[in-house]
Image: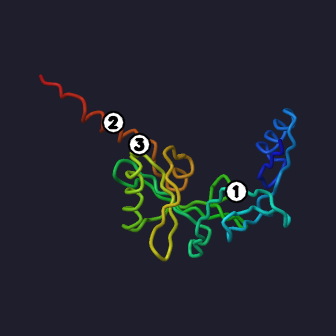
């Protein structure tokens, strides 16, 4: 089987491991720099092209609108229960469009607008989540939800905001359990 591994560098640990596992099993594996790929989505049969040649014919492509005014930044709102307990703005590193902290993005505490707070809480509860990280973009049309994380990381948001998010989650759980326990009489 021919296997293409989309990655910026073949030397990255995960990329190298996947390539070696494919080779060990007798497959052909090539690392493809995804920044050198482009998509033709103008026909009924979208294609992914690499160096001017089709890389995939029956490609399943997800297209997301580019929000210029976001400027490479997004917002992470940490929702616990029915409120946002911490929020940070993540700014992408130079030359990167993703603002993930592990990709070199920088984070700082921000104050959300009432509309952003309402959107974050609604997004979490639409998915039935009591604890969630809701990622949004600021657009000319208001906040746009791009992802809802059911198991959001704590390190980045606690460092950026100084909020004890873990403690807040535990307090939330304590209150929920206390409401369900019968009261002692005596």
Quadrant of the frame with the C terminus: top left
Regarding mark 2 in the picture, which secondary structure is present there? helix
Sequence-wise, the earlier of marks 3 and 2 is 3
| Residue at image point 52% right, 52% down | 157
Regarding mark 1 in the picture, which secondary structure is present there? loop
- Nearer to the camera, 182 or 62: 62
Residue 55 in picture, x, y percent from top left: 80, 57
Cα separation, mark 1 vs mark 2, equals: 48 Å
Read off the residue under disc 1. Answer: 59
Crowding near pointer 3: few (<14 within 10 Å), some, many (20+)? Answer: some
Q: Which callout, 3 or 1, points to the residue nearer the camera?
A: 1
Q: Which mark is residue 174?
A: 2
Residue 144 in picture, x, y percent from top left: 48, 66
Q: Which mark is residue 30?
A: none
Q: Which callout, 1 or 2, points to the residue nearer the camera?
A: 1
Sequence-wise, the earlier of marks 3 and 1 is 1
Read off the residue under disc 3. Answer: 169
Tag 1 and tag 2, C-beta contact below 8 Å: no
- Nearer to the camera, 108 or 179: 179
Cα separation, mark 3 vs mark 1, equals: 41 Å
Name the outermost residue toward the top. Answer: 186
Name the outermost residue toward the left. Answer: 186
- Nearer to the camera, 60 or 33: 60
Residue 36 against residue 132 in the figure, above or below: below
Horizontal side, residue 93 vs residue 165: left or right: right
| Residue at image point 44% right, 72% down | 142
Tag 3 and tag 2, C-beta contact below 8 Å: no
Cα separation, mark 3 vs mark 2, equals: 9 Å
Name the outermost residue toward the front. Answer: 44
Regarding mark 3 in the picture, which secondary structure is present there? helix
């Amino acid at each position: 089987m021919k296997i293409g591994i989309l990655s910026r560098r073949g030397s990255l640990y995960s990329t190298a491991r996947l390539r070696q596992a494919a080779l060990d099993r007798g497959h052909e594996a090539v690392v493809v720099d995804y920044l050198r790929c482009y998509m033709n989505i103008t026909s009924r049969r979208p294609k992914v092209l690499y160096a001017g040649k089709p890389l995939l014919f029956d490609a399943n492509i997800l297209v997301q609108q580019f929000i210029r005014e976001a400027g490479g930044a997004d917002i992470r709102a940490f929702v616990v229960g029915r409120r946002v307990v911490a929020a940070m703005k993540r700014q992408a590193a130079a030359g990167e469009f993703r603002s993930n902290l592990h990709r070199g993005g920088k984070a700082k505490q921000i104050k959300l607008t009432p509309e952003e707070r309402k959107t974050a809480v609604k997004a979490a509860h639409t998915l039935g989540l009591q604890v969630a990280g809701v990622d949004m973009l600021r657009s000319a049309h208001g906040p746009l939800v791009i992802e809802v994380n059911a198991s959001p990381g704590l390190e980045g948001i606690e460092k950026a905001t100084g909020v004890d998010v873990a403690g807040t989650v535990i307090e939330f759980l304590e209150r929920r359990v206390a409401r369900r326990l019968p009261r002692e009489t005596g």
